[in-house]
Amino acid sequence: MFAARAAAAPWGARLPGGRRLRSSVPPSRSAQSGPARPRSPGTAGRTRSTSGISVDFTETREAYKSKESLELLRSLVVLKLCSYDFLVEKNKEIMDLGETVLGQKAFHQLLKMTFYGQFVAGEDQNAIKPLIEKNLAFGVGSVLDYSVEEDIGSIKHEQKETNSCASAAGKHSLGEDHREKESEELFVSGQGGWNGARTYSHPDEAKCDQHMETFIKCIKASGGSSIEGFSAIKMTALGRPQLLLHFSEVLMKWQRFFTFLATQQGQDGLEAVEQRLELTQLQDFLTKVGAKGDFYGWFTGKQESAGYINILDWKSLIDDREKASDLLVVPNVELGELEPLFKTFTADEEKELKRIMQRLDVLAKHALENGVRLMVDAEQTYFQPAISKLTVDLQRLQNREKPVIFNTYQCYLKEAYDSVTADVQLSRREGWHFAAKLVRGAYMDQERERAAEIGYDDPINPDYESTSRMYHSSFEVAVSASRELEDTPALLFRTTHHGP
C-alpha cells in the first residue's frame, strides 16, 4: 500500500505488525503541500503547480475547489471524531470490536469510506495516480510515505513477548533460532549498487533491508505518478532504534562538552553557532584535566581555524574519529576524569552505522534516477541527533548539484533554531544545497511524558506561540541563506503536523 503524507491518523489501515498508512492531501493540509520558495509579501499563501495554476490558499473557495461536498463532510466528521481522546486512546479496541460486529468485509468498507479515505491515498501505485493527478491540477503536490518506524517502547514490548515465548518453548531452542537468524545469508536487490549475499550480524538488519526495498517502491511510485515528486523515509526503519539511541547519546555528550567549554571561556549566553573557543585556552584547560591529545595542533593545521573554533569545527572531529580518537574525550562525572567518547561504542555498531549509510545511499540513487526528492522524517528527540547527523552526511554527498535530500526540523523543540542555523552554515562552508522540511512537531505528549519520567528538562517549547516564533525564525534563516547563496540555493518545504 502507498500513502501520501499528511496528518497522522489515530485510525487508519493497519498493516502487519500494527503499522498504519497515512494520507497526504486532506483539505486542511492542501495549503502546505509542496516546497515553499522565497516569495515577496504580496504572494504569501500562494503556490503554483507545474501546470501553471496558481492557488491563493487564503481564499477558502479556491482552497477547497477540488473537493466535493461529501468529501468535505467526511473531513468534518473524521476530524471531529479524532478530537475525542477516548476514541484515540482506545482505537485498537474499538476497531477490533467493529470488525467482530460488522464482519471483516463490511468493516473494511466502512474504513475506506471514512478514516482510510480521509488519510490514505491508495493501496498501490495505480490506485494513487488519479488522486495525485487531480490534486496536481489544482496546484497541490504529494509526498508518498510508507509510515513504518520503530520506538524503544515497542521494542521492549516485543522483547517481553519474545522472553515469554522463550519460557514456553525452552531457552535452548530460542537460542538456536537466534543464532540461525544472525548468521543467515539473505539476498538483497542489487539495484542501486548493493549486490550479492549479505551476512547479518543482527537479526534486525534483515528487516531494515526489507524496509529499504519498500521505500524503493515508494520512490518509483512517486517518480511514475508526479513531476518532481517527494518520498518520505524513516531512519528507525533503516537501522536499529537502540543503535540510533546510543549514537545520539554519544553526539549529545560531545555537544554538551563544547557548551561547557564555551561557558568556561565566557561564551555562555551566545547562540550556539556564535560560540567560539580560543585554542590556546582550550588546550591549556584540557591538558590540566588530563587530556593527552594535541587540540591546538589539530585545528591550527586547518586554514579556517584562525586560532578559534566553533561548534562546526568541534563536531567535525566525529567525522575524523579514526584519526582523532585521542581528541575525542569527555568528562566522566562519577570518576572525576576524562574518558573516550566512543568508549562504549562497539565495532559491530560502527558496522551497523555504515550499513545505514549504505541503505541511504541506495535510496538516494533511486531518488535521482526517478526524479524524486527524498525527505528524511524527524522522529523522537532521543533518536534525532543520530538521524540528523546521518541525514547531513547524506546531504554532503547527494546535494552537491541540486537539492535531493531534505532534513526535517521540528520547531516545537527548543533547539530547532540552533540546529537549522548550524546546518545552514555547514552547507555554506562545504558548498552543498541546504534542503529542509520545517514542521512544528508530532511527538509532544510522548516527549513531555518521557522527560518527566526520566527527569530531564522538557525539550518542547512551553506554548504554541513560542513554537510559532521558532518556526518563523528558522524559516527566515533558511530563506536568507537561499538569497545569499546563488550557486547552492536552499530549498524549503514548509508544513506542519496537524493533530486530529
Image (spheres, rainbow, N blue to C red):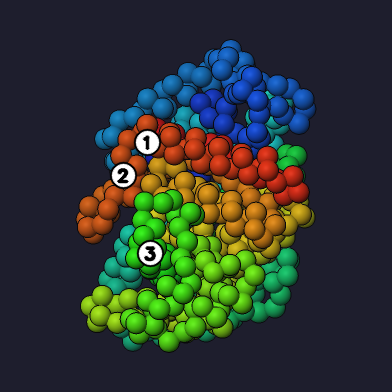
* Image quadrant in which you'd find residue 142: top right
Q: Which residue is mark 1?
A: 466
Number of numbered callouts drawn? 3
Picture quarter with the C terminus: top left
The residue lying at 47 percent from left, 84 percent from top is: 293
Mark 2 surroundings: few (<14), some (14-19) or many (≥20) residues within 10 A: few
Q: Are marks 3 and 1 in contact (CB under 8 Å)?
A: no
The residue lying at 51 percent from left, 58 percent from top is: 388
Pick the residue in front: 55 or 484: 484
Where is residue 411 shown, x and y percent of the image? 45, 42
Where is residue 231 shown, x and y percent of the image? 63, 48
Q: Earlier in the sequence, mark 1 or mark 2?
A: 2
Q: Amino acid at mark 1?
A: Ser
Q: Secondary structure at mark 2?
A: helix
Mark 3 or mark 1, which is nearer to you? 3
Q: Secondary structure at mark 1?
A: helix
Measure the alpha-carbon separation of dots 3 and 1.
30 Å
Q: Amino acid at mark 2?
A: Asp
The residue lying at 59 percent from left, 51 percent from top is: 424
In the image as oriented, which residue stretches furthest toward the top?
Answer: 61
